[in-house]
Amino acid sequence: MRPLVFLLLPALLGAQSLKDFEKKVTEFTLANGLHFIVIERHEAPVVSFHTYVNVGSVDDPSGETGIAHMFEHMAFKGTQTIGTKNWPEEKKALDAIEVVYNQLDKEKRKGFHSDPKKIEALQADLKKAIEHADSLVEENEYDRIVESNGGVGMNAGTAEDSTNYFYSFPSNKIELWFLLESERFLQPVFREFYKERDVVREERRMRVESSPQGKLVEALLATAFEAHPYRVMPGGWASDIDNFRRPEAEAFYKLYYTPNNITIGIAGDVNPADAKRMAEKYFARLPRGPIPPLVRTVEPPQEGEKRVAVSSPAQPFLATAYKRPDQYSKDDAALDVLSDVLSGGRTGIIYRELVRDKKIALGAGSQSTFPSGRYPSLFLFFVAPSSGHSVEENEKELNAIIDRVKKDRVDDEAIQRVKTKLRAALIRKLDSNSGLASELCSYYVNFGDWRKLFTELEDYDKVTAADVQRVAKTYLTDSTKTVAYTFAPAEGGAK
C-alpha cells in the first residue's frame, strides 16, 4: 500500500525517532467511539482537519451503487439551522416530495397495468413539490460560513474503502470547525436531494461515459472482478443513480455514519487539551451505533486470462492488471518497490523503453495497488500508444519487459535508487498539515495504529532484488491477468 502521502512521517521528522514524534501526538476516544488523533505543529496559525469515515463504495447495497458517493454530496447541504430559510416549513416540503414519489413509484410498479395519465400527473406534482422545497433553501450557506471565516481547501472524496472530508481553518477558528463538523453529521438534512442526484449523474457522464479512459477502467474492473464490490467504480452504475431515493441515503447514513465508525485527524497550531474539550462538547452528542456490517463477498480465484475491448475513436489505451493480495500481505512492500522499478518516473524500465527509447508510447506506468487495498486487488499497468503505433505492439513490448523482470533479477543499484527516490518524494510533502492529518487517520483505521507509517518504512528498507523478482514471478502470471484496451469502431473488437 502506497498512499498519496507516502512515508510522510520520517521525512517530517528527519532524524527524530518515533518516540520523539509520539510526544507531538495526542490520541483520545470519546465514549461514543469517535477517535481523535491530534498532532501539534505550531509553525503557522493554521489547523487542518480530516474526517475519515470507514465506509466506501464497497459498502454500497446492491441496486444502490454510488450511494456512498451520493451521501458525500449531501454532507455539504447543511443542517436544520444552516442552509434553510424556514426549517419547519422545509421539512414539511421535503416529506411531501417523498409522499408524491411513493405514489409515483407505486403506479410505475403496476407495469403494463399502470395508468400513463396518472404517471404524467404525478410527475408534474413531483416537479412542483421539489421546486417548493428548493425555494426554502439558503443556497451554499455552509460553504459561505466556512469561506467567510478563513476556511480553505474544503472538499471531500469517496473511495472504495473510505469517505473523507477535509479543510483547514485559522487556528482562532478551531471551535467553529468543531461546531460545523459535528452538526453536519449529527443532523444532516437531505435537501436538494434530487437536484444533487442529477449533479452526480452528470459527474458520471463526464468522468466515465464521455471519457475513453473512464470507460476503459470501468470495463477493466467489471471484467477483472466477478463478485467483489471492487468491480464497481465509486460513482456507481447509471441506472442505480437514476433511481436513488432520499430514504435510501438516509438509511445508509444511519448505518455507517456512526461515531464509532469515524476517525478525525487534526494537525497544526492546536492545543490538544482544547481539542479534547471541544470534542467532548460537540462530538459527544453523536449517538453510538452498532458496528457496521463487513463486506462478505470474496472474489473467487481467477482461472485464466480475461480480455475486454472498448470502442473509442479517441486516443487508444491499454490496461493490463494482475490479481494481487491485499495491503496486509507480507509482499505488499516488495510489490510497491517492483512498481517503482518498472515505472517510477523517467528512470522506470517501462517509461525508459516504451516512451523514451522506442517511442511507441506517449505514456506508460504502473500502480501496485488498484483500485484500493483493503481487499485483494490488482497490480495495474497502463500504456497510451503514440501515433502510428498500436495497442498490440505496446502490449507485446510490455509483456516482454514483465517476462524479463521475472527472469533476470533487477540490480541492487536500481532497488536502492527507488528507495532513495521514495524517501526524497516525502520531503516535498512534509509541510502539508492536511496530508499529515489524512495519513494518520488512514493508517489508524487500516492498520490499527498510525505508527505503521514508521514500520512501513522499515518494510521498504528490507526489500531486496530477490524479493522483487519473487513477487513478479508469483503475481504477474497469465492466469490472473485481465487485459482491457480501446479500439477504433471501424477496427472491430477482435484481437
Image: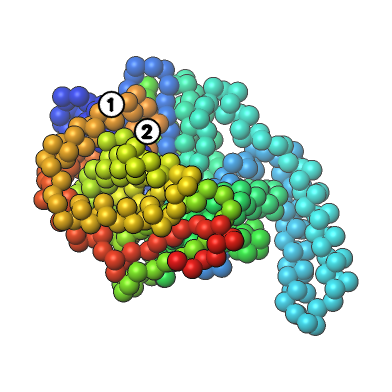
Image point (81%, 55%), residue name:
127
Horizontal arrangement in the rendering, residue 220 relative to residue 115 (left or right): left
Q: Nearer the viewer, residue 270 or 166?
A: 166
44 to 125, vertically: above or below: above
Residue that numbered label 2 is attached to: 435
Residue that numbered label 1 is attached to: 427
* Mark 2: few/some/many CA within 10 Å (<14, 14-19, 20+): many
Helix, strand or loop status at disc 2: helix
- CB contact under 8 Å: marks 2 and 1: no
Q: Nearer the viewer, residue 414 or 279?
A: 414
Q: Nearer the viewer, residue 446 or 78?
A: 446
Image point (70%, 49%), residue name:
195
Q: Nearer the viewer, residue 423 or 266?
A: 423
Please state the horizontal and vertical placement of residue 88, each as a whole percent of the image: 73, 47
285 to 55, vertically: above or below: above
Please state the horizontal and vertical placement of residue 143, each as a whole percent of the image: 61, 33
Horizontal arrangement in the rendering, residue 52 relative to residue 316 (left or right): left
Name the quadrant of the C terminus.
bottom left
Helix, strand or loop status at disc 1: helix
